[in-house]
Image (cartoon, rainbow, N blue to C red):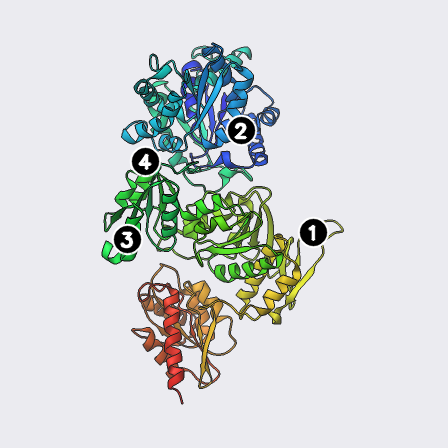
Amino acid sequence: MIGVFDSGVGGLSVLRHLWRLAPGVPVLYVADSGRAPYGNRPPEQIRAFGIQIAAYLRRQGTRLLVVACNTSSAVALPEVQEAFGGPVVGMLEPAARAAAHRWQAPGGRVGVLATPTTVASGAYRRALAAAAPHLEVVEEACPEWAPLVEAGRFDGEAVHEAVRRHVGPLVEAGVQGVLLGCTHYPFLRPVIERVLAEEGGATAAAPEAAVLDPAEAVAAEAVRRLSQAGVAIREGEDEGPGSDRFVTSGDPDAFREALERLVGPAHRAAGRAWAGVGPVRWKGSPMAIPTRLASELPASWQGVRVAVIGLGVENLPLVRYLVAHGARVVAADRKSAEEMGPRAEALERLGVRLVLGDSYLDALQEAEVAFVTPGLPKHLPAIEAARRAGVVITGQTDLFMRLCPAPIVGITGSSGKTTTTTLVGRMLRGTGRPVFVGGNIGEPLIERLAEIGPDAWVVLELSSFQLETTGISPHVAVVTNVTPNHLDVHPSMEAYVAAKTRIVAFQGPDDVAVLNGDDPITVEMAGRTAGRVHWFGRRPRRPGAWLEGDRLVAAMTAAGPGDGGEVQELCRRDDIRLRGQHNVQNVLAAATAALCCGTPVEAIRDVARTFEGVPHRLEAVASIDGVLYVNDSIATTPARAIAGLQSFQEPIVLIAGGYDKHLPFDELARVAVERCRHVVLLGQTAGAIERALEQVREETGRAVSHERVASLEQAVAAARQVARPGDVVLLSPACASYDMFRNFEERGARFRQIVRALQEATP
């Protein structure tokens, strides 16, 4: 049996030749679903993963291993060979020897078409220099070709144009021929040959002879090595090939569809059949985590067709950046030009073509890269169709993180993101370095790249919507917690968790993940990062920070025999001016991240003692007739509202309800029955929360009085009627605001206005 290892599906081009040359030998193909940004991983992780695969294939009884991955062939071939303990064939040497044989004339010039990662690595240039020193090498990076192949797009006007864009410069450079330096590219060979004939030059006379497919050379070398080992390669010489098998860490059914799309006819013509093994998880590997479809953005935006979908706060600066760097931008939004107002006029002045109204997603059809606004569901049919067509679906956050020269601290979570982000930003100022705070809060930082140097810190709040289009992780990734949220946009809780996991998914061994040790979902994320893990929470877990009695303490080294690491006191629980246990967790998370960045304890302690919070987060608005009115409009989930309820010892009159995100209210109802004097309900979810309260009454016999109102003004008035001196009127809606307001800030601001007007009218 032959084992073939590739980080995507490009290795299938090798299999097409193996089926022809060795029809009597079955294959075990180990790959991902075509979505792993494997070439961008640190060398140490590539080696570790290659060793795992080699050992696995050896255990499965394979006689020869083909490493059909340029990156592993360049970085990890010796280690893979040692782990496999048998013959191993990589991509580079057979391809270079074939080039030397085909183009023997001294002073010749050969073009290499490859991915940006392979070109940047210089792998083919080195291999050709060793095997064919008489050839001059001209390299061309083709970022969009692999996604086209993965989508099954082998022909058509867009494919022809994508090929011409990169083959043309090689023809102009006078190459004798081109070497396809990516295992995806042989699927585009007919188009490449057609473009060579059209462009003329030295390759025009016999374009089919001018294209070298390394996969064929690799397959021939594998068969030669098998013959030397005495392995029968023809049917009839032994029991025949049986079924080929594939192993994937992704969805086996989706992978089987990829096999059918790319090599189905060739596989059936060879009289073979596939059998899936898995899904499997490779420990610490990039394939064991959710990944994006295409990992690489163009090295240059000059002339690239880009669609920017959604023209809100985040994407307007992005459009300006792309236009300034030569992209051909189409900007799209559901709103009309009249609704867009001055923004539409500003975009037209930039020379951007606008696609507005209900058909705005049509802008995806001719794009090579699409930047999608964070809140737009990524599983919409038009977006899925574009993805299948080879369009790179990404976001402004991904681009900024790739371009940012400074180390990034990224913070995500279902609640506590903004408070923790703000705390980290203030704590990092204690390092004496410039600090930039942005992402899901504040201003988009893409237009401030020129101000950000490598000596700065960048702190980003990252939502699940931003993370689901990223293929890169921050240097320090913080996850405050994960509870159900945004299930009106994410298709499932699993999809929501997968989006959150991306904050650690692409980390390398020099990066750090700061995780909530009290949250089972974040604890599981520790197995999804290649970085070092630090913890925070209520109980000791080292390295990290925790609550010890009434002290917040930290130890930044793991406990070992005779050495538990130095435990430092950060501050006292009563020193923190923020209300609630959840804010103690936020301080611990921020402190852990800041310590990982080298912040002095004194700076952390000072921020913890002086920070008074962010607006709309348990914000004390006014005290009227002995009743405290508190704005917690940020509580857009039941879990967040529960944290707000548990932050007070006083009796509470709760104002809750709003836009329906399809979240359960069972636990909120149980806590409300325990902690509230009265509940005032409004918005789309008023009925659902009311039913949850009634269910608690039926199950436990305990109840809380409640009523429904039509507006926030009526809610405040109703709460005032019920509240007594010493009570708290708490706006903690447990829901988003979109049924009545544009966002939670507008809702909180309106609550503040109503309460202060009431205060002014009170004698």
Q: What is the CA distance from the residue labelled 1 to the residue labelled 2? A: 35 Å
Give left or right: position of 261 versus 568. Answer: left
Tell me the mark number nearer the camera, choosing from 1 and 3. Answer: 3
Seen in the picture, residue 219 relative to 446 is either above or below; the reply is: above
Q: CA distance from mark 1 to mark 4?
A: 51 Å
- Which disc is residue 559 wearing? 1
Residue 271 at x, y = what percent? 36, 19
- Circle 3: residue type: Ala
The local crowd at label 2, few if under 14, some if 14 to 19, many if 20 or more residues have their Cα within 10 Å, is many
Q: Earlier in the sequence, mark 3 or mark 4?
A: 3
C-alpha gap between disc 1 and disc 3: 58 Å
Whole-number angstrom distance, CA of label 4 to CA of label 2: 28 Å
Residue 304: percent from left, percent from top: 35, 37
Q: Is label 3 or label 4 in front?
A: 3
Vertical position of residue 263 compared to residue 375: above or below: above
At a point 51% along the width and 68% down the height, the residue shown is 613
Which residue position is annotated with label 4? 389
- Residue denoted by label 2: 72
